[in-house]
Amino acid sequence: MRSIFRACSALAGLVVLGCASPTAPEDAQAIPQTQNPQDVWPTLSSTRTLDPEIERRIDEILANLTVEEKVGQLIQADINSITPADLLDYPLGSILNGGNSAPEGNVRIDATAWLALADEFYEAANQRSGGTYIPLIWGTDAVHGHNNVVGATIFPHNIGLGATGDPELLQRIGEVTALETVITGQDWSFAPTLAVARNDRWGRTYESFSEDPEIVAAYAGRIVEGLQGGRDAPDRLRNGRVLSSAKHFLGDGGTNAGIDQGDTTSDEAELARVHGAGYVTAIEAGVEIVMASFNSWHGKKLHGHKYLLTDVLKTHWGFDGFVVGDWNGHGQVAGCSPVECPAAIMAGLDMFMAPDSWRGLYHNTLDNVRNGEITEARLDDAVRRILRVKIRAGLFEKPKPSQRRYAGAFDHLGGPAHRAVAREAVRKSLVLLKNEAGVLPINGNARVLVTGAGAHDMGVQTGGWTLSWQGSGNSRDDFPNAETIWEGLRHAITKRGGTAILSPSGDYSAQPDVAIVVYGEPPYAEFQGDRGDIAFRDPDDHLDLLERFREAGIPTVSVFLSGRPMWANRLINASDSFVAAWLPGSEGGGIADVLIGDPDGTTQFDFEGRLSFSWPDHPDHAELHSGQGTPLFAIGYGLDYDSGQTVGMLDPMASYDLSMQTGTGQLLERGRPITPWRVVLESDGMTHDITGTMRHSGTKVAVDRLDYHAQEDAMTVAWQDAASVSVSGPSVDWTRAANADLSLVLEAWVDHDQMGDLALSIGCSGNECGQSVQLANLMEPGASAGWHRLAVPLKCMTEDTELFAATDQPVVLSATEPAQIALYAAHLAPTEGVAECAQQ
């Protein structure tokens, strides 16, 4: 799933970008597919027989539907781009809430608002005058719990669940997630993700249970049964159950270099054996929906891949539910755009996910049917599949969402019983990589210092896809039914008579018996998390903190929070014990359950987690599956309290430059460029690279330092005449960023009276990628002088987003007259709360 992207909306008053040009033709290379799927693809052990009564009912409905009503069933719109009133004129079949979508556009709104909006959409679909009533279906990204809703139970991300080795637990997690989803009125979870991540540089690695397809297959069917109920159970899709969708079909975890939405070039046998493994057990468990993937297979986009969608999935495997697209993914098919893509329907897609492009897509798809580009048979087949799922789910008979069983039972949302399941999942997901000198378990009556950037930070603890798309901007107050790692440790230690001290700086007045240091990756989702290597880069320098404790003779325990296994040898060396805690979710107390023992030395819980991904022994060892390299810790590794195994000193690779930030979206921080970016001045045909000094005195432009949060942590730029200042460096591909809901953000001190004609643009291979934007237009009217967040969606810079494929000057500030600005940071960020393009 993608987050909010309004580029192809037909909403009145919005500047429409990126819709005029069809996607560039796909690579014409031959795709190495067999003509007989049964020769390569596994055979299901059991298949479902169609219910004659349901098929007869579908025949009756189809016979009475107009072509407008049929086309409407093929389209799913996002709640940030459609209102209940729109359904009176557009008979759409589905809605969704994307990563940053919520009632009233507020991702932190009370849970009651979700249920109220579900009722409004239900009633609008029911009130449409004339025609045949077909219930609406609402899908949501409930991918680690009902994670879009404040107060819900947030489970560990899939990478942590993969380490539990407990498929039965996965089924219970599905049950809890389904019930909490029903409480707020949604019908459908966009889960589970069945990717088999084969390159840990991929930003969605944490959405994968394992690099091992057998582990993914063992979990897939169980979580489907948890969400939907057993395939043959009498209460299936009733009484607190929701529809499940297996995603992303197919090969999303196998793209070259781990690039999100990239190209998977494995042969068909590997595609089937590795990436298809989870779908076998999911379909056998009765999954009703499959979501098509953004990636390509040998250059052909999955949204338009008839062989895989129709010949393999529907014909060979007998999948009789429907195939839904991903966020405007049909627009990436050759010859298509977000507002028109008959090729995707003809290939086997049944429902477009058209969050903001739905209006134009509806009208164009009607034309495609009328002119024969979409055949009547294919249209009817797609509608039949959608109706089949809705009938099986009982949607025709169910009352409005607030009147269904469990709806509005908000005391169960994040309730004690549900949190207990999440806490169990946290305990079982923890993998002990190192435990020298028996530092763990910690004696409960000890004096324990707790520190580190992740100790009391719910955002780091829960990761992406939590309340917002990227999981950014979340505070402790956003999680009323939760416990941070610090809070869990404090409760466990004080309960046993010990002393717990939270010290963000690591300072102390009385020396502790042991220090627990919690740190890891900041939140991210999708390609925002793509990396050039898998070395952990620590902006808060926890290594220095660990070494200070060691010099003071204080034993240390590192609790490492990450969405992938990462090379962290220097930190492991500096820690007496090192725990891979992944992204544990809302129940920080699960960590304390395992780390803290009783005063007599006994422990209630031991470490059960075992690696479901190989742990790297080099920053570039992102592909360690199938014997491709020697891991530091192999898949299946994990110590417990009886292991007695020592790790010893690991190669610190002292010459490896950990200052380099390889993510393409981080440009400037604390007033200085992040490697490999540089700051370059240009005037009168002359260039000056000032990266080394960050100061320059010239007649046309001057650069100096300014104190903001700390000494000289901002860069001031003052123009007297025509000149430009740019963040420059190697060419990077920002096409995906431009096609998503991402903005270029400057954290800057600005004053309307001192801005002159100061403009922001982006440079690509020596040319301006698109239009420049006056910085004054990015400020709120009447805003006073001071520090502001200035943001412009990349899609607003140009209609031809393919230009961003060679971005080498991601920030260019130009002026022809006196102007002044101070910069603290520049980066890509989600377009949440950013003005529309028409206002730029």
Image (cartoon, rainbow, N blue to C red):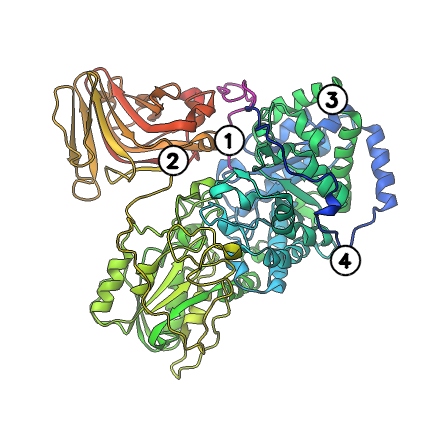
Of mark 2 and mark 4, the one earlier in the sequence is: 4
- Which residue corresponds to mark 1? 5
Magenta residues, dominant SS class = loop
User: How far separated are the C-alphas under marks 1 and 3?
Assistant: 26 Å
Three-letter code for the amino acid on which mark 1 is drawn: Phe
**Which amino acid type is shown beneath numbered disc 3?**
Val
Q: Earlier in the sequence, mark 3 or mark 4?
A: 4
Instruction: Look at label 2 and name its amino acid.
Output: Leu
Real-space CA distance between mark 1 and mark 4, rounded to the nearest whole angstrom = 39 Å
Circle number at residue 233: 4
Residue drawn at 69 percent across, 34 percent down? 306
* Farthest residue, direction bottom: 600
x then y, percent, for residue 372: 75, 20
Determine crowd level at label 2: few under 14, some 14-19, many 20+ residues with C-alpha closer than 10 A.
many
Contact between labelled residues 4 and 3, with CB atoms less than 8 Å apart: no
Please name the amino acid that badge 4 sits on. Ala
